[in-house]
Amino acid sequence: MNLIRLEIADLVWALGLMAIAIGLSAWQRIGLEGQLTLATGRTTVQLLVVGYFLEAVFALNDPWVVLAVVVVMLTIAAIVARNRISKKIPQVLLVVWGSILVSSALTLAYTNLLIIRPATWYEPQYIIPLAGIVLGNAMNGAAIAGERLVSSINTSQLEIETHLSLGATPQQAVASYRKEAIKAGMIPTINTMMVVGVVTLPGIITGQLLSGVRPIDAAAYQMLIMFMLALTTITTTLLVTQGLCRQFFNQAAQLQKF
């Protein structure tokens, strides 16, 4: 099977899809014309820039460049998750950044060294796309779990302080809230795993099929990716919630309000 490459003319025709969507919005007076136009422009520019940039990174095949790209992706993911959780809690960015780093590094190292085993550990063809998928999922898991935990603690301060006054440790006082936050952070990943290949075909397997990869090979890679996402997400949510819980208590084990 040969890959059918999309030329400039094909991409122009592809813009026709968005033109139709914008036209439908205008016809029905939905008012999304401006947002759809902006989204179309940003998608086009961002993906073209990323495409040319990654082409240069792939050509260089330098470990320091690959690591720099991954660190930038990691930092952006941590900032986005932090903004979703809270900007008031001290060191929350460091907690999220460190949690995503540990969980993603663990997953990528396991996958790279034991499963894929490329010629060089920094092979950009594997490291960058896998890191992007893992970091994106870790970001979502951290944001959902962190936001749920912060919200639960802020609305349950009386109950937590009651547990503390009865002799509970800070970890015991917030254990149920932390557990529910972790479950919330895992829901999207678990739901996707439940229906993958039955209800949805994720982007990775779809892209591989379009590029001419054998369906069974595409399915194998998608299976690997889903397992990677599960490990990364649960590790991230465990670390993020643990770190956030510590920020809510001072050295005297007193609950702090943010």
Image (cartoon, rainbow, N blue to C red):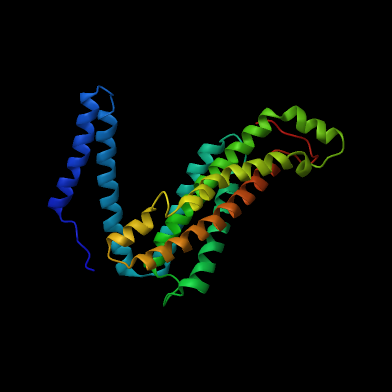
Question: Is 101 displayed left or right of 239 in the figure?
Answer: left
Residue 56 lies, with reference to residue 192, above or below; the image says below
Farthest-out residue, front: 198
Residue 38 lies, with reference to residue 117, above or below; the image says above
Quadrant location of residue 103? Answer: bottom right
Specify the quadrant that holds the C terminus.
top right
Residue 19 lies, with reference to residue 238, above or below; the image says above
Question: Is 1 displayed left or right of 99 in the figure?
Answer: left
Residue displayed at 61% across by 47% down: 240
* Front residue (pair 257, 144): 144
Quadrant location of residue 187? Answer: top right
Farthest-out residue, right: 166
Quadrant location of residue 231? Answer: bottom right
Residue displayed at 19% across by 46% down: 14
Specify the quadrant that holds the N terminus.
bottom left
Residue 171: where, in percent of width, then height? 76, 44
